[in-house]
Amino acid sequence: MTLVIGLTGGIASGKSTVSSLLKELGFPIVDADVIAKEAVDQGKPAYSRIAEVFGHRVLQDDGAIDRAKLGSEIFADPEKRKMLNEIVHPEVRKEMIRQRDEYIQQGSKAVILDIPLLFESRLAHFADKSLLVYVTPETQLERLMKRNGYAQKEAQQRIDSQMPLDEKKLLADEVLDNNGTREETEVQLLGILRKWKISE
Ligand SMILES: CC(C)(COP(=O)(O)OP(=O)(O)OC[C@H]1O[C@@H](n2cnc3c(N)ncnc32)[C@H](O)[C@@H]1O)[C@@H](O)C(=O)NCCC(=O)NCCS
Ligand SMILES: Nc1ncnc2c1ncn2[C@@H]1O[C@H](COP(=O)(O)OP(=O)(O)OP(=O)(O)O)[C@@H](O)[C@H]1O
């Protein structure tokens, strides 16, 4: 039996940091952000729909999606965000399920679904257990501004486009507190994996 783990958090809460640790431990990762990026490659159905709906202003000179431009439009406008989600999310869901089921078929002990919007998009039923990477609003804002070089307003807009981490805490099966060092997070992670009986 494969344990399917839904790894989630908020923007810049530390999901990639935790999924790298899980990868080092040998667990396969299905990454929704990577799949969402591939889904909008030139020639894919979602690419044409985005060009149609958002116009050529969100394309670079080489024709690829200008992610910074599209991001600044959709994070500033909930209606536009909904339109983009309706184009991209069905493709992402299909591909995530395909990859998840392939790992299950191979008999993996566990598979990690790294999904930022696990709760917002009501996808928790894709997984057996949910694991939240939690940070306080202050840590989240600080790390996001630092990592992406965003001004405070830009960073806060992105944070506010997601369910607050304090609400996600109430929905998750297990919570990793990532306000401390990476090492402290790793210790907590190993404890949870042992509890779920997928690590020594
Ligand atoms: C808006 C886009 C072009 C911005 O691209 P960019 O390279 O700057 O960011 P990236 O894709 O690496 O996403 C960074 C983080 O932003 C957050 N985020 C992305 N899209 C959304 C969204 N629609 N709603 C809320 N948060 C989002 C997630 O926490 C994600 O981890 C891109 O995020 C996108 O296509 N989003 C729509 C698809 C989506 O919802 N992806 C998230 C997981 S399915
Ligand atoms: N425990 C930690 N201590 C200090 N910095 C950290 C810690 N964990 C993560 N970071 C840093 O915080 C930033 C956000 O982490 P990460 O990229 O893993 O978040 P994420 O949840 O995957 O983000 P996104 O949803 O935007 O892809 C990165 O710059 C990362 O190096």
Image: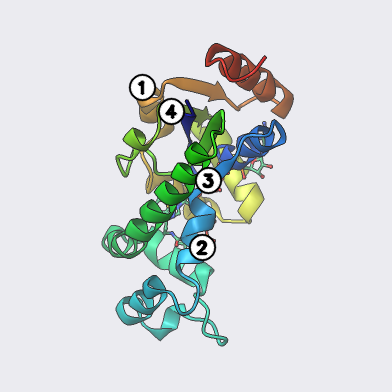
Answer with the quarter of the image where residue 186 lies.
Answer: top right
Q: CA distance from mark 1 to mark 4?
A: 11 Å
Q: Amino acid at mark 2?
A: Lys
Disc number placed over residue 30 in the picture, else none = 3
Q: Are marks 3 and 1 in contact (CB under 8 Å)?
A: no
List x then y, in percent, for residue 121: 31, 44
Q: Earlier in the sequence, mark 1 or mark 2?
A: 2
Residue at point 47% right, 20% down? 174
Asked whether the beta carbons under mark 1 and mark 4 sit within 8 Å of each other, the answer is: no
Residue type for callout 4: Ser
Earlier-in-chain disc, 1 versus 4: 4
Residue corresponding to mark 1:
170
As drawn, is 156 to the left or to the right of 139?
A: left
Residue at x-position 43% and y-position 32%: 165
Mark 2 or mark 3: which comes first in sequence?
Answer: 3
* Mark 3 C-beta to ligand 1 under 8 Å: no
Circle 1 packing at 10 Å, graded few (<14), some (14-19), many (20+), is few
Q: CA distance from mark 4 to mark 3?
A: 14 Å
**Cα distance, mark 1 to mark 2?**
29 Å
Q: Which residue is mark 2?
A: 37
Depth check, front residue: 70 or 45: 45
